[in-house]
Image: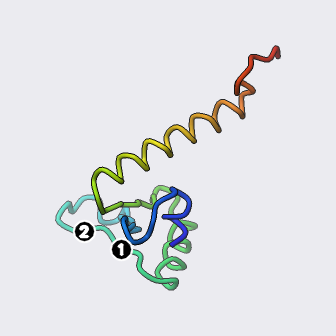
Amino acid sequence: MMVLEDFGMHEKIVSAELSYFPSSLMSNLGIPPVVISNDRQVCSFIGYRKKNSSIYLCVSFTGEEEHLKQTLTQVEIRNQKEDSSERGFVGERRRV
């Protein structure tokens, strides 16, 4: 699954679940989020998102707790490096 690849996680150790919660159901907290499990549901989510920009895609990871913590820490470090490089602060200071 591409989500796992993006986060550097191994499919046999960690699984990812995509879901969203339609804003029309926000007032009813007993309703579970809509789980996305195939291409048709991805297309439905994209169509719904185009009509309603206040809906967000959620990713839930399940698996070995230690592996999840380690991988998410690595993702945070990588994101910090990317944020710094966009500002020109990787390994050296630059004058602007």
Q: Position of residue 17 (x, y in %)?
A: 37, 68
70 to the left or right of 26: right
State left or right for residue 73 relative to residue 50. left
Q: Which residue bears the numbered disc 2?
A: 32
Q: Are marks 1 and 2 in contact (CB under 8 Å)?
A: yes
> Residue at point 50% right, 46% down?
75
> Quadrant location of the C terminus?
top right
Q: How many marks?
A: 2
Please identify, in this view, whether the residue under mark 1 or under mark 2 is nearer the observer.
1
Q: Residue at x 45, y 65 (%)?
A: 10
Q: Residue 81 is drawn in which quadrant?
A: top right
Say if 32 sits above or below 69 in the image. Answer: below
Residue type of the residue flagged with mark 1: Val
Direction right: furthest residue: 96
SS at circle 1: strand
On the rendered structure, is 36 left or right of 44? Answer: left
Residue indicated by mark 1: 35
Which amino acid lies under the numbered mark 2 shown in the image of this protein?
Pro
Q: Is residue 85 above or below residue 65?
A: above
Quarter occupied by residue 22 = bottom left
Q: Locate residue 15, reporting x and y percent.
A: 37, 68
Give the CA separation, mark 1 to mark 2.
9 Å
Along the line of sight, the residue nearer the viewer: 67 or 32: 67
Q: Is residue 46 left or right of residue 20?
A: right
Q: Residue at x 30, y 50 (%)?
A: 66
Of residues 13 and 72, the one nearer the viewer is: 13
Q: Is residue 72 above or below residue 38?
A: above
Name which residue lies at 46% across and 60% down. Answer: 9
Indicate the position of residue 68 as horizontal and vertical percent values. 35, 53
For label 2, the SS is loop
